[in-house]
Amino acid sequence: MSVLYEELKNRLAQEKGTALATIVRGPQHLGAKLLVLPDKTIRGTLGLPDLERQVVEDAERAIWQGEARTRTYTIPATNQDFDVFIEGFPPPPTLIIVGAGHIAIPLTTFAKTLNYRVVVIDARSAFATRERFPHADDLIVAWPDEVLQQMDLNPSTSVAVLTHDPKFDEPTLTVILQHELGYVGAIGSRKTNAERAERLKRQGLTDEQLSHIHGPIGLNIGATSPEEMALAIMAEIVATRYGKDRTAIQDWSKK
């Protein structure tokens, strides 16, 4: 096995995102391969720096989209065309639940059913127990913002902030909004979310960062019980993952 494939195998085993690009048509370097990591670090070579610069941009996006397709590139200096097959391998989707309250229990169940890796974080040891969350992959009793600063947060990560307490959720949102995530949702009414957004702006967050928060959290399905609320949240996470508009989802449900 080549060194390149060995590294790809190891990264997949460690559940780390990567993409593999292969020249499948062109006047030269047919079969050349390039491994692209999430930070655009590369392994191997396609033999043409101008081609690599173009491929790396698409390969990095393919990692998070789990995309596999052939793209055509033209080298400006020579006007040569190359077809490059790019296959992205994203990490498994992860749901981080901040706050081990009553909604978090069925939300963990729904997420595990959909093959998400689930991490539950809460500083309150009375709530974050294995008896309440037997199916969580990780159960962490600590201040959420401190834990999240040490975690690999990426576009395959969704975060549901369910603490409904400014001393927990605001430091948490300050940390996670520094990263490009797949989904960020925060519990609370429209008024609560608006007031929280104003406080976060005074702490230095931008309107663009705050626009990534789904709040009130979850699709509007008329949920009242913890189980229904968890279903609404999970549905919104999945819809966001696949690029579906919230309004379109709700309109479809009425047909």
Image (cartoon, rainbow, N blue to C red):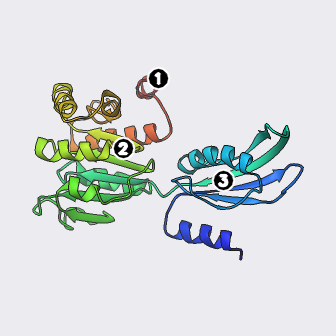
Task: Name the residue that disc number 3 marks.
Answer: 87
Task: Answer with left or right where residue 153 lies relative to residue 76.
Answer: left
The reply to whether residue 130 is in sight is yes
Provide residue 205's location: percent of width, then percent of height: 26, 34
- Kindly report which numbered mark, 1 or 3, lies closer to the viewer in this rendering: 3
Judge the density around disc 2: few (<14), some (14-19), many (≥20) Cα neighbours within 10 Å: many
**Which quadrant of the view contains residue 148?**
bottom left
> Which residue occupies the extreme bottom position in the image?
1
Task: Name the residue that disc number 2 marks.
Answer: 234
Judge the density around disc 1: few (<14), some (14-19), many (≥20) Cα neighbours within 10 Å: few
Contact between marks 1 and 3 (CB within 8 A): the answer is no
Task: Name the residue that disc number 1 marks.
Answer: 255
Q: Amino acid at mark 3?
A: Glu
- Kindly report which numbered mark, 2 or 1, lies closer to the viewer in this rendering: 2
Q: Nearer the viewer, residue 92 or 154?
A: 154
> Which is more N-terminal, label 1 or label 2?
2
For the N terminus, which image quadrant?
Answer: bottom right
Separation of disc 2 and disc 3 at Cα?
27 Å
> Which is more N-terminal, label 3 or label 1?
3
Label 3 SS? strand
Task: Answer with left or right where residue 96 lies relative to residue 73.
Answer: left
Separation of disc 2 and disc 1 at Cα?
21 Å
Q: Amino acid at mark 1?
A: Lys
- Residue at (33% x, 34% y) in the render: 209
Label 2 SS? helix
- Residue at (81% x, 45% y) in the render: 82
Q: Amino acid at mark 2?
A: Met
Label 1 SS? loop
- Kindly report which numbered mark, 2 or 3, lies closer to the viewer in this rendering: 3
Q: Nearer the viewer, residue 106 or 237?
A: 237
Q: Nearer the viewer, residue 78 or 224?
A: 78
